[in-house]
Amino acid sequence: MAEFRRRKRKVCQMCAGKHVSYKDDTVKKYVSLDKGKILPRRITGACAKHQRYIANEVKKARFMALLPFVK
């Protein structure tokens, strides 16, 4: 029989102590390169609370013209 391998669960970077702000380039890590969409939790590894925070920071950066709405 085939053995199933469990993937190691990603740790939320902000729970671990990193800070994300719209003012610096850390927000770019949470936006897709081709279309500029906010990446989902399963890809970023963020918890639900911090994913909402990331979404708000990306929206602030877009409004301030630090990030483009569309590439």
Image (spheres, grey):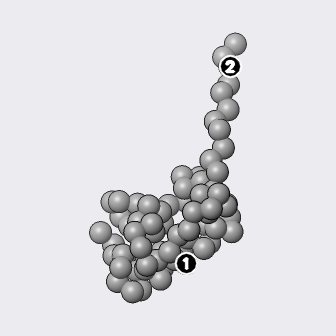
Label 2 vs label 1: CA separation?
A: 41 Å
Q: Position of residue 2 (x, y in %)?
A: 66, 17
Above or below residue 29? Residue 10 is above
Q: Does the rendering let one see residue 37?
A: no
Residue 47, compared with residue 68, is above or below; it is above
Within-10-Å neighbours for mark 2: few <14, some 14–19, many 20+:
few
Which residue is labeled 2 in the image?
3
* Residue displayed at 68% across by 19% down: 3
Most extreme residue toward the bottom is 64
Query: Up-down: is 70 above or below 7?
Result: below
Mark 2 vs mark 1: give the one in front. Answer: 1
Q: Residue at x 67, y 61 (%)?
A: 15
Q: On the rendered structure, is 59 left or right of 46? A: left
- Asked whether the viewer can see residue 1, the reply is yes
**Residue type (three-letter) at the residue carrying disc 1:** Asn
The disc placed on residue 56 is 1
Label 2's element? loop
Q: At x 62% / y 72%, what residue is drawn? A: 52
Relative image position of residue 59 (x, y in whole percent): 48, 79
Residue reaching furthest to the left: 71
Amino acid marked by disc 2: Glu
